[in-house]
Amino acid sequence: MSVWELIRKKRSIRKFEDKPLTDEEMHRILEAGRRCQSGFNSQPWRFIVVTDRELQEKLSNIGGATQHMVGSAMAIMLLSPHAEKSDRYWQDMFDVGQASAYMQLTAADMGIGSCPGSVVRPEIAREVLGFPDEWDLKLMLSFGYPDKDEYPDRPPKQGTRKPFEEIVRFNGWSSD
Amino acid sequence: MSVWELIRKKRSIRKFEDKPLTDEEMHRILEAGRRCQSGFNSQPWRFIVVTDRELQEKLSNIGGATQHMVGSAMAIMLLSPHAEKSDRYWQDMFDVGQASAYMQLTAADMGIGSCPGSVVRPEIAREVLGFPDEWDLKLMLSFGYPDKDEYPDRPPKQGTRKPFEEIVRFNGWSSD
């Protein structure tokens, strides 16, 4: 499937089949993130993979909508620099967004679903996973094969995006 | 080509053939960005497309390494919310990073090269393009068919990324 088709058909998957990913699948997804470009090749990320069910339970409330990690085949904590310790925080978070998209699209291409979650209580994750103070945690991803009952095959739902004309302008804010 | 192959073979393209993109190509790239997911579906972006050579010249120095837009078939200014006006700036910039990756990968899948550039003088762009104060500009993208002399077919160069073991940890910072 072309990237364009993948993007058009992609939906967030929050409920997963009870089926692990193979080592090769996990590695490919993680490699897609690791290989991603970044400003000045700074690679402002570390990825903590959480496959352990007990750890997933302990981490499930680090965000308001991060419970989908419980029962996922692989949750990835996307560690990033702290805002106050980076003079290019906007670039760092943009780069983490790129790496995250690379991982999600690589997974989708293998039929593996995923969903991001925003983290508001990184201190819980820090305690559970023991990552150093120099790294912050703002976002995570859950991966796994989509639960078939929850996601029967069907055409993608009607878009909820703002119209093209509002988002895209040509050669100036007031389009020519 | 699978997403995985695209990511592995992808390189930054900064010099372009003198060949416009078709309307369909431009539309597909822009649609890939517009359709991208974002936190709470906030769609924290507007895209100003710059195909006009004179405007590209005027904008070329908005960043230290944004000159590649001159002669590109399409430059896209990725407008984003201001840091001080957003209480989830990290999420906004992460989302813009995702949208940007969607656009670059969709282009790559059509054989169209691209390169991001960081913007440090948004005020120049604001004056030239007339976008409102409520939007900031931190990053842009250049697109076009790769210049054949500059980029002969060859295998991707050796990676300059940190090793897998440094970036990826399993079930804790100190991998099990």
Image (cartoon, coloured by chain):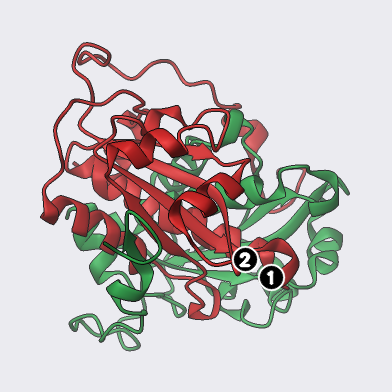
Chain colours: A green, B red
Say which residue appears at 25% left-offset and 61% top-offset.
A6
Task: Give the quarter of the figure containing the N terminus of chain B.
Answer: top left
Position of residue B78 measured from the top left corner of the image (x, y, whole percent): 46, 54
A34 to B41, vertically: above or below: above
Position of residue A175 measured from the top left corner of the image (x, y, whole percent): 31, 64
Asked if disc 1 and disc 2 are in contact, CB closer than 8 Å, the reply is yes
Please state which of residues A74 and A135 is positioned toward the viewer in this rendering. A135
B54 on left or right of A82 = left
Q: Residues within 10 Å of mark 2 (few under 14, many from 20)?
A: many
Q: Which mark is residue A60?
A: none
Which amino acid, by three-letter code, is at mark 1? Answer: Arg
Which residue is tagged 2? Answer: B91
Residue A100 visible, this angle:
no
Q: Quadrant of residue A66?
A: bottom right
Say which residue appears at 32% left-offset and 42% top-offset.
B4
Which residue is tagged 1? Answer: B88
A162 to A80, vertically: above or below: below
Q: Residues within 10 Å of mark 1 (few under 14, many from 20)?
A: few
Position of residue B35 measured from the top left corner of the image (x, y, whole percent): 33, 69
B109 on left or right of A32 = left
Which amino acid, by three-letter code, is at mark 2? Answer: Gln
Position of residue A110 measured from the top left corner of the image (x, y, whole percent): 29, 55
B39 to B63, vertically: above or below: below
Both marks 1 and 2 on one chain: yes
Q: Secondary structure at mark 2?
A: helix
Please state which of residues B65 and B159 is positioned toward the viewer in this rendering. B65
